[in-house]
Image (cartoon, grey):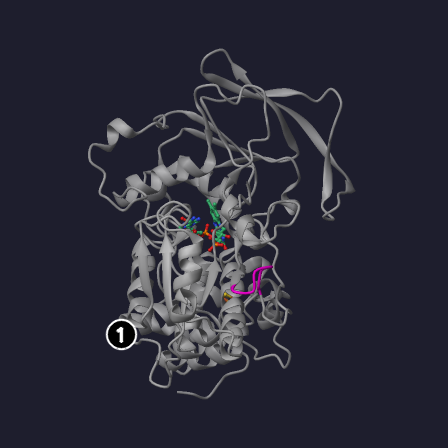
Amino acid sequence: SSSKNVFEFLELPREMPRRIPLALRQGGDWGELYGQFGEDAARHQSARCLDCGNPYCSWKCPLHNYIPRWLELAREGRIHEAAALAHETNPLPEICGRVCPQDRLCEGSCTLNDGFGAVTIGAVEKYISDRAIAEGWTPDMSKVKPTGARVAVIGAGPAGLSCADRLAHAGIEATVFDRYEQIGGLLQFGIPSFKLDKAIVQTRREILEGMGVKFRLGVEVGRDVTLDTLLAEYDAVFLGLGSYRYTDGGLPGQDLRGVLPALPFLVQNGRIVSGLQPDGKPIAGWEDQMQLPDLKGRRVVVLGGGDTGMDCVRSAVRLGATQVTCAYRRDEANMPGSAREVSNAREEGVQFLFNRQPLGLLGTDAVTGVRVAETRLGEPDEKGRRRAEIIEGSESVLDADVVIIAFGFRPDAPEWLATHGVELEPDGRIRTSGEHGNHPYQTAHPRIFAGGDAVRGADLVVTAAFEGREAAAGIAKLLRNGERRSVADAAA
Ligand code: FAD
Ligand code: SF4
C-alpha cells in the first residue's frame, strides 16, 4: 500500500542488508560484503524516512541527491521512477551507494541518528539502481537533441564517467580515453571487490555505451595521442586524471624486503581476484609475475588510517595473514576513513593501534618490525586537524613480516599540461574556476576543464562524480555560447 505509517522508524530498526559470514571472509572470500535488500526490507527501510522539511541528508550529500523523494518512491515500489530520479543528480548511484562513507555524509546527518539509527540511504540507493538496471531500465535519452559537438574525456574514473554521462544528456558526444583497458580508474584498480564487485563497473560501462558514450581504452594521452591532437579534433577536453603520486613518508628502512606500497599491493590483488591485468588481458602464469609475498600465516602491519589503509588490512585478512595490525598516528575519532569500514575491519580481526607514529622499519634484509612512538594530539595544523605530537620515551617495536605503507596520494599532473597553459596549484593540483565559476571547473585554458582527485587531491568517488557533473555543465554552457571549435575550424 502507499499509505505511510509515520512511526515506521519506531517499529522497524535500521537494518543493513545481510553480510557475508565472518568465517568466509577470514577464509578468503572476496565477494561484496553487503548483499542486497529483499523487496520488503527495501520498502521498510525506505519507509523509515521522516521526510524532514529540511532534508539535511540531501545537503550533506556532495551531489545533493533528492534522497527523501526517491526513498518515498522506493517505499511505494516505484523502482524505475526512483532510479530515474536518483540518476538525475547522480550518474553513478549504484557505485556511490556501495562506496560512499555514508556515516560521514548523507546518513551522518539523518535526523534519526538521534537514538534510532539513520535511514540506510546508501543501501537503498544501491538497491534502486541495481534492481531497475537488472529489470532493463536505462536512462531516458528520448528528449536529447544532438548538438554535433564532441568532447574528449581523459580518464575513465568516476570524474570522467560522470562528465561523459552528463555530456551525453546534453547532446554532446563524449569519447573517454584511458590508459587502461578497463574503465573505472580506482573503482576498477584500487577499491577491492569486497567493497565493489567489478561486474558493477562493467554494467555501468554498458549503460554509458548505450547512451552513446565512446571509449578509447588502452590509450595514454601524452604518449599514444597528444593533447594537441585532442584539442584539434574535439571542441573541448575534460581532464579526470586522478592523483597517484605515492607518499612514502621517507621512513628509514622502507626499501627492506616485505615493505610494500599500498596501491600496487591492492591492484595486484585485485588483478588476481578478477583474473585480469590492468591492461585488461587475462593473466597468463601470473604466479611468475607476482612480486607480492605470500601473506598466509604472516604478521602484517599497515601504516595509515585512511580508506586505502582499511582496504589493505581487510585484504591481508582475506589473504590469510594470522595477525593484522593497523597503526595510525592520531586517535580513532580523527581517522580519515569511513567508520563503517573501520568497524568491518575490527570485526574481521584487525587490531588497531591508535596514537602511534612510525619512526622506521627494522631488519637487515627483510623487514622484521616497525619502530613506533606514542603520540598525543596537539595544536591544529593549517588544515585544522590536530597534530600528532610524539611522547618522549614512548618508543616500542611492532613485530612484522610484512609492512604495507598507506599514507595517501598526491597529485602528479603530467608535464604536457603546462605547455598548454593549464595552471597548477602550488601542491600540484590542477587549478580550475571551481564550482561557482562562470564555466564551472574550467582550467586556465578555456577549452580544457578538469575535476576529481586531480583537482581536489585524493578524495572520494562522490566528490569526483560531482565535479565531473558540474564540469560537463560548464562545457555545455561554453559550447552553447558558440565558442565551439569544429574540426574544420581547427584544420583551417
Ligand atoms: P581515478 O579514479 O584515479 O581515475 C583516473 C583515471 O585516469 C585512471 O583510470 C587513469 O588510468 C586515467 N588516466 C590518468 N592519466 C591518463 C592519461 N594520461 N591518459 C589516459 N588515461 C589517464 N572513495 C570513496 O568514495 N569510497 C571508498 O571506499 C574509497 N576507497 C578507496 C580505496 C583506495 C585503495 C583508493 C586508492 C581510493 C579510494 N577512494 C574511495 C577514493 C576514490 O577512489 C577516488 O577519490 C576516485 O576514484 C577519484 O576519481 P577520479 O576520476 O578523479 O580518478
Ligand atoms: Fe549518500 Fe553518497 Fe548516495 Fe549522496 S551519493 S546519497 S552521500 S550514498
Q: Is residue 286 above or below residue 384?
A: above
**Residue 449 horizontal/vertical position (percent):** 53, 62
Left or right of residue 293: residue 114: right
Which amino acid does the dot numbered 1 rest on?
A: Glu
Left or right of residue 359: residue 233: left
User: Residue sitting at 53 percent across and 59 percent down?
Assistant: 451
Magenta highlight: main SS: loop
**Residue 282 horizontal/vertical position (percent):** 22, 42
The residue lying furthest to the front in this view is 492
**Residue 227 horizontal/vertical position (percent):** 44, 54
Q: Is residue 445 magenta?
A: yes
**Residue 410 in sight in this render:** yes
Q: Quadrant of residue 388?
A: top right
Q: Which corner quadrant holds the C terminus?
A: bottom left
Between 29 and 276, the one lying in front of the other is 276
Q: Which corner quadrant holds the N terminus?
A: bottom left
Label 1 sits on residue? 135
- Label 1, secondary structure: give it: loop
The residue lying furthest to the top in this view is 364
User: Residue sitting at 33 percent across and 50 percent down?
Assistant: 219
Q: Quadrant of residue 133?
A: bottom left
Left or right of residue 398: residue 170: left
The magenta stretch spans which residues?
Answer: 441-447
Q: Is residue 202 magenta?
A: no
Q: Is residue 438 above or below residue 343?
A: below
Between 345 and 436, the one lying in front of the other is 436
The residue lying furthest to the left in this view is 284
**Residue 77 in sight in this render:** no
